[in-house]
Amino acid sequence: MIEALPNIQTIFFVVVFVIIYIVEYFNSNRVWKTARFKRFFFHTIFAVINSIILYIPRLLLLLPVLLFTEEKQFGFLNAIDQFYFIEALIGFLFFDFAYYWWHRFNHTIPFLWRFHSVHHLDTHLDVTTSLRFHFGELILSLIYDVFLILIIGAQLEVYIFYKIILTSSSHFHHSNLKLPDRINNLLMYFIVTPKFHTNHHTVVETTRNANYTSILTIWDRLFFTYIDSNDIDRSNMGLENRNLELSLFENLKRPFVRDQNELT
């Protein structure tokens, strides 16, 4: 089963993406500033490049660690020996808690922000934005995953399940879907919604440096990083002092440029 991990994730990744992309067209919240097909093509290239670059690291680094923890019964969950459901729940909460901090570190540690800022360069927000990550950030995230797996010793199925929910949540909360206010406000007590995450992508630094959680909103509430913004703020997304869309090459080289303002 472990060999099927990349395929299982890819299937869910694509299926959920396509569903939201279609629904988004008929039920959009904001007017698109650029043509949808251009955004789709541009961000799909990001995804293809990332898939090619990360294939070997996942094969040589991630999968052996998953095998090691399972065969050697290594990590916290293997030590406590509880019911499978309890272990799965602890593992899920642990990963989500850890990803909250990983996202927060990506905003507060300058080296990590150099890579993560590429994601925030998008001046619009829709489901294709969930494909827009620099390969450098994903490699660093993979290394972070390895440490998390070694600490928690999660079952393979728990890791797969969390990653499926994580990518599905990313597609959903980056989307341009329009939800009724009553439903959105109810969901935001529990999970990240498009409105919740749009606050995180505004040009206003105070709202951008907030709402870090990936799935469960409880982490932002517990650590006082939840913030709301008004409709005007949510209509202006991206980074400050950026007037032009960067080419794919400029996006990819941006983290390695000493003065990033040269590309803005």
Image (cartoon, rainbow, N blue to C red):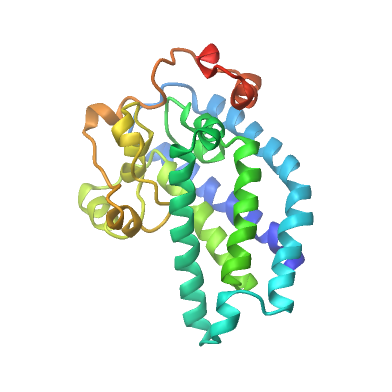
* Residue 38 shown left or right of residue 45 in the figure: left
* Residue 198 shown left or right of residue 231 in the figure: right
Count of numbered circles on the image: 0
Residue found 21% across the figure and 33% down from its top: 230
Question: 202 and 187: which one is in front?
Answer: 202
Question: 88 and 102: which one is in front?
Answer: 102
Residue found 54% across the figure and 19% down from its top: 260
Q: In the rendered view, tell whether residue 245 sits above or below residue 139.
A: above
Q: Is residue 103 visible?
A: yes
Residue found 35% across the figure and 49% down from its top: 193
Q: In the rendered view, tell whether residue 138 sits above or below residue 253.
A: below
Q: Is residue 1 visible?
A: no
Q: In the rendered view, tell whether residue 106 sits above or below residue 259.
A: below
Question: 38 and 252: which one is in front?
Answer: 252
The image position of residue 126, as x and y in percent, is 44, 36
Residue found 64% across the figure and 37% down from its top: 136
Residue 210, picture quadrant: top left
The image position of residue 212, as x and y in percent, is 39, 46
Residue 38, picture quadrant: top right
The image position of residue 253, as x and y in percent, is 65, 23
The image position of residue 232, as x and y in percent, is 23, 26
Q: Locate the N terminus and report the quarter of the image it occupies.
A: bottom right
